[in-house]
Image (cartoon, rainbow, N blue to C red):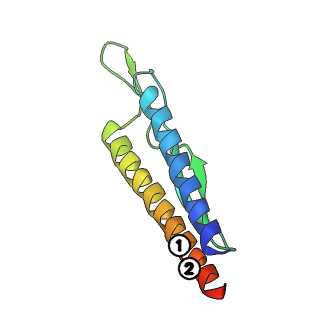
């Protein structure tokens, strides 16, 4: 896989992580909700993909009055969103550099 494909796959992973985190935050007040996760998984041909899963250890809980809460950790979601945003930004920058180098190479060849 070339630089462009690797960068695009990184962007897709970051966007998927942002989407899942937004879903988790939107359901943070839903009783018994169990959040999803998406980890980056390296591909043999190069690049990465998002591997989605639901951790079994984080489940909703009930207070002493019977009210159910979700298993969403908002601090973890904030960190996930910051990290995923950086993943998207870095891979976009790599695409910009790749395109600039390709354009310079074509200019030299002309």
Furthest residue toward front = 110
Question: Which quarter shows the C terminus?
Answer: bottom right
Question: Which quarter shows the N terminus?
Answer: bottom right
- Residue 100: mark in rendering: 1
Q: Residue at x 65, y 75 (%)?
A: 2
Left/right of residue 53 with respect to residue 26 in the rendered view:
right
Q: Residue at x 38, y 42 (%)?
A: 77
Q: Residue at x 61, y 61 (%)?
A: 9
| SS under mark 2 | helix
- Residue 81: mark in rendering: none
Is 44 or 66 nearer to us in this picture?
Answer: 44
Q: Give residue 98's position: percent from left, percent from top.
A: 55, 73
Instruction: State how far apart marks 2 and 1 are (Cα).
Output: 6 Å
* Above or below, comparing residue 71 to residue 8 in the picture: above
Is 104 or 29 nearer to us in this picture?
Answer: 104
Left/right of residue 79 with respect to residue 54 in the rendered view:
left
Asked whether the residues under the numbered discs 2 and 1 touch, taking CB atoms below 8 Å apart as contact, a structural biologist would say yes
Q: Which residue is mark 2?
A: 104
Q: Give residue 42's position: percent from left, percent from top.
A: 59, 68
């Amino acid at each position: 896989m070339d630089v462009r494909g690797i960068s695009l796959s990184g962007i897709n992973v970051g966007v998927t992580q942002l989407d899942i985190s937004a879903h988790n935050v939107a359901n943070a007040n839903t009783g018994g909700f169990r959040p999803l996760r998406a980890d980056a998984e390296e591909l043999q041909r190069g690049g990465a993909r998002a591997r989605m899963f639901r951790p079994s250890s984080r489940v909703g809980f009930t207070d002493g009055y019977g009210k159910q809460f979700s298993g969403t950790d908002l601090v973890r979601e904030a960190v996930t969103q910051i990290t995923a945003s950086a993943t998207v930004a870095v891979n976009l920058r790599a695409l910009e550099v790749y395109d600039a180098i390709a354009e310079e190479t074509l200019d030299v060849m002309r």
